[in-house]
Image (cartoon, grey):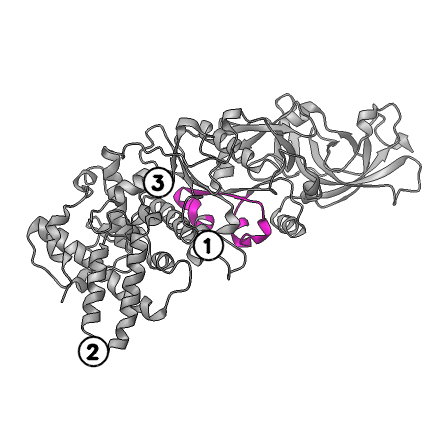
Amino acid sequence: MISRFNTVTSFGRVISVRGSLARVGILAPGEMPVSDLRATVGRFISIRCATTTTIVAMITEVTCEHQLSSDEYIATASVDLLGEISGGERAKFQRGVTNYPTIGDAVDLITAQDLRTVYAPSGSDQINIGNLQQDRSVIAYVDVEEMLSKHFAVLGSTGVGKSTSVSLLLNEILQARPNLRVFLLDVHNEYGRCFGDRALVLNPRNLKLPFWLFNFEEIVDVLFGGRPGVPEELDVLSEIIPMAKGIYTQYQNSDRIGLKRMDPRSGGYTVDTPVPYRLVDLISLIDERMGKLENRSSRIIYHKLISRIETVRNDPRYAFMFDNANVGGDTMAEVVSHLFRLPANGRPMTIMQLAGFPAEVVDSVVSVLCRMAFDFGLWSDGVSPLLFVCEEAHRYASADRNIGFGPTRKAVSRIAKEGRKYGVFLGLVTQRPAELDATIISQCNTLFAMRLANERDQALLRSAVSDAAANLLSFVPSLGTREVLAFGEGVALPTRLRFKEVPVHQLPRSEATIASVPSVAAGHDMHFVSAVLDRWRGATSNRDVPSDPGGGSDRPAAARLMTPVEAPMLQPSMGLDPDRFSLLKKPLR
């Protein structure tokens, strides 16, 4: 019977083919080394076709329960056909199979040389993250472009080396892409020392995130401490905030060009337009309305609202939001430049340490940061790419719509669905993928799965992996520390690998918050930021804006990115003297 096939000693032979699947009869040991007898799940094999092509497949099942009647085979194995090596001396690997095997084709365990061909770096965008578990001499590379542009996720239970792996990936990405900006949400304050002088570390003590950058849902969440707002008070706020923005803008303009005072209602701002306003104006407007009420019982709503605002304003934990809340000054350009490293000034990465923030406002702060990251990418046409890494992602984008803060989930989801079009990439890190919104994780096309013991987490992972070798996931509960199954566009093949050792100074560890505030960005980049902000604001206000005189776009002029000639004409406001607005210190009666 053996004479019908290739007489060269082989590991086995193809006995059936169906689509991307095949079955292999494993031959009796013969003269094969003992090491070659370990035909088990996860090992790669090569199938020698009649052409010069070698098909690469992976064993997904081995059994001796359904052996053929002949004694020729000691077991049978099911394999997934993954790709093929062709090209002779200049061998090259490609995914997919163009030449299918036939019955009787010889099968061997893949050689180290073939593995190196499969995982050989195809360009400068490849980063070295570790070694194959099957053959430690073969380096595992990841394609940075594919990993970033189509988002990625790192999944794993606590204690499996997840944080260390994130540090490794981000350090390698920064080395390969020095001009890429990275923003990391550090939930447990453990990454502060992992990136040396390449990262700016922010925390409540050195962060300046003005309250007027929060949209309506976010500021309500802050004022009501994460609880649902009182409808009557929300109605008042939704009417008063746009008026407060109009008051600030009209006095700013009147001081500059001598305009008469106008009705603040005609400003055309919405509650979500990111322009400054002052708390003193907000409270004065509420007080003015309260003074016009004849029924004293109706004034309770206004008293409570003022009390909420004053309580939060005077809470020292909220100083990062309300510091200089009554001084004024349009600092949005400086804030955006500082947060998202424009220019980077040698520090392309921002680490936002969240452990020191009041628990009631963490969700709102994350929502603001995600939303601003996406909106800046949108209104800058993605000219400065940003990687937004979300640690403990299930906390902000829960699968249960009744848990968490809706705007935060919406902001993360927006980056996941549309961010790649505007140069905003997403990296998710979570220990409970089953609790993460399935729509969001489905947008991540490169997955690094470390040990997961929970059955629900494993089930979600199985549904998210589209590769033919999804059977590899049976290894997930038994993976060792630093071991990972890598799937998706960023890797050549679904692979079980081991992350390489991380230098001691890059190891994450919980620590006290680090205060390091560099000087505010200056130079021509500020004009670029200001031009983007003009478009951004124009998209969220309903003022009459002249059309683009160039006729090249249907966007209003305020929503059009300025040319290098126009950009220097837009000067950001660097702060205003509060004494100029003494009239606003008095209640409006």
Q: Is residue 87 above or below residue 557?
A: above
Residue at which label 1 appears: 409
Left or right: 115, with 348 as reference point:
right
Q: Residues within 10 Å of mark 1 (few under 14, many from 20)?
A: many
Q: Quadrant of the C terminus?
A: bottom left
Specify the label residue 205 is tagged with: 3
Residue flagged by tag 1: what amino acid is it?
Answer: Arg
Instruction: Name the residue located 53 percent from the left edge and 54 percent from the top edge.
Output: 437
Q: Secondary structure at mark 1?
A: helix
Residue flagged by tag 2: what amino acid is it?
Answer: Glu
Residue 199 occupies quadrant: top left
Specify the label residue 294 is tagged with: 2
Which mark is first along the chain, 2 or 1? 2
One can see residue 544 in this view: no
Label tally: 3
Query: Mark 3 and 2 residues: CB-CB less than 8 Å, in contact?
Result: no
* Residue 450 percent location from the top left of the image: 62, 39
Which mark is first along the chain, 3 or 1? 3
Instruction: List the single residue furthest toward the bottom.
Output: 295
* Residue 559 percent location from the top left of the image: 26, 50
* Residue 573 percent location from the top left of the image: 19, 44
* Residue 185 percent location from the top left of the image: 44, 42
Q: Residues within 10 Å of mark 3 (few under 14, many from 20)?
A: some
Q: Which region is colored magenta?
A: 416-445
Residue 434 drawn in magenta: yes
Mark 1 or mark 3, whichever is nearer to me: 3
Residue 420 drawn in magenta: yes
Residue flagged by tag 3: what amino acid is it?
Answer: Arg
